[in-house]
Image (cartoon, rainbow, N blue to C red):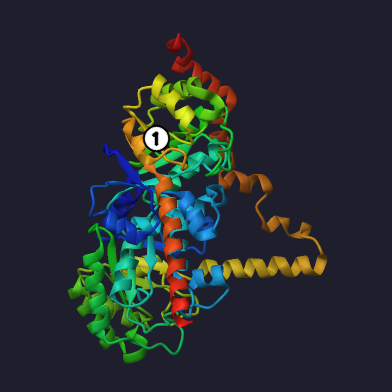
Amino acid sequence: METEMIIPAAVDAIKLQELEKVPSKTVFISARLLARQFLGQDNEGLLCLSEYANFLRYLRLTTSLSLLADGQSGFGNALNTYYTAGELARSGADQMILNDQTFPAHSRQAQPPVSILDFVGKLKAAQDGLKTSSTELIVKLDGIQYYGIAGIEERLKIAAKLEAQAVVIGHLSPNLFLKLQNKISLKNIGLAQDNSLIPKTELAQAQPAFVIATNEAIENQKNEAMRFISYMEEKQNAKI
Amino acid sequence: MQKFDQLRKTFDKAVHTDNQITNMIVTPDSLSARIAEKLGFKAIFAAGYATSASNLAMPDRGIADFSIMLNKCREIVNAVNIPVFADADTGYGDLDNIRRTVRSYESIGAAGLFLEDQKWPKRCGHMAGKSVESTEVLVEKIKTAVKSRKNQDFLIMSRTDARAVYGLKEAIERSQQYLKAGADLIFIEAPQSIAELREIAAAFPKTPLMANMIEGGATPMLTSGELRKLGFRIVVHPTALTYAHTYATEELLSTLKKKGTTVTEQDKMLTFDRFNNFIGLDKVNHREQQYSATKMNQVLKGLNIKEESH
């Protein structure tokens, strides 16, 4: 993945076409955004792999942007992760995120992380599944509230040894973010803006390798809905 | 995907090899495709008659749409490691649809596709009541398809159904126009005699031709060897498995309905173990075992994470 500070999240082909006009090279196809759009629920874990991959294939044909696919927690165990990786690669993913939540992964409040052994198993399985493709693996660590900074350090080493292309840390609180900055160099690590607790600009100020701006996309989605409601109300009032 | 590139090349080479015929079986599903691959078939055809039947329990009358056809083809592509050629019917609309159809089939890893000159909703080429568009319609579609593909070895086949409507001469003339428009392969549907098959072969001595062998259809049933000698490079069997599956299902279910058990029919089935073996249960189980806690413990130790921390 080429270095770029902000990776926007989108699930809309028109938005992808607009993003081609700005410096963004990579777009995160967020399963959370997709679940909100299709199901009206803020929970990525409601989507199954085939639903997500089908949508990814639609988007793949619309853009030359690099697509960061959301492999969530591999949709099950290591075996499922192996098949997830293959399916996302075939569906046009340039990179695939694999988080360390217990299946099914959740968007707002992360599920507890899998054990270290399951983490290793899933990483290996994902790499095996991607072997015959050029799709890169990005590991997302969502369990900082459970395993702390020491757990992050341990998982960073494992991800590096197992040749993950990048690591991104998500589900941060202001307190944990502060600790993280004090203990770990973020130069080669990405941060995910999974909630509204820390503004995107603040995450960027820590100078990580990149920021995945999922929450910003969620806020935009909400704002669009609000604008639509205001517009309809104005129309109704004008009639009265 | 490397696999897709390789399979397209394999198919391209096979159909352009002299004195060789590629025997394509239409498989209604991934399982049948896997069986065909295991038995040594070198290519699969994902086609409308079988997909309409297996997915919708409907005749091939233009009800199975682009999405149903594309997904079926994709399932088969993913299940085998031999080329899968696609029946793209009329391309499902106008030239915008052709662009989307070609890009979609190419991206899922099909070896190529055919586009036909029937009016939508189309019907099986051997059914009565067909009507065809003017030649120009498919000429433009073929030109668009050729421009839309990313890989030159994603092959575009033209299919004309004009034989049934206007006669063989018109069907040949149309196909010559389609060839000029850029078609890589030619398919004239439903010739009615061996003499007509010969006439088609004589009209296109340098272009790979496809013949369609439908049990009970308009074209005489010939063997692959006989068609090869006539000059055809591809033969497709679109209905055999659909009819065989339907027959087997009807037989078995009749017995089950009558006797309340399938015990007497087991000699006509695979055993539980043989089927699981065929379908690759051992491989999947083995794959899962590769990531077991015991093995991952060994991997973790090998990574020396703890030692490096101290």
Residue B236's x, y, as percent? 40, 68
Above or below residue B203? Residue B224 is: above
Could you say whether the residue bearing mark 1 is in a helix, strand or loop?
Answer: strand
Viewport quadrant of the N terminus of chain A: top left
Residue A156 horizontal/vertical position (percent): 42, 24
- Residue at image position (25%, 84%) is B135
Q: Nearer the viewer, residue A234 or B25?
A: A234
Q: Write the residue at 50% across / 69% down.
A: B51
**Identity of the residue furthest to the right in this view:** B259
Q: Is residue B184 visible?
A: no
Residue tagged 1: A191
Q: Nearer the viewer, residue A224 or B182?
A: A224
- Note whether residue A149 is visible: yes
Q: Locate residue B309 relative to residue B160 in the image: left or right.
A: right
Identify which amino acid the numbered label 1 is placed on: Leu
On screen, B249 above or below A101?
below
* Location of residue A164 (image quadrant): top left
Classify B187 as above or below A145: below
x and y percent of residue B60 in the render?
Answer: 49, 77
Q: Is residue B210 left or right of residue A219?
A: left
- Packing grade of label 1 (10 A; few <14, some 14-19, many >=20) is many
Residue B166 at x, y = what percent?
31, 91
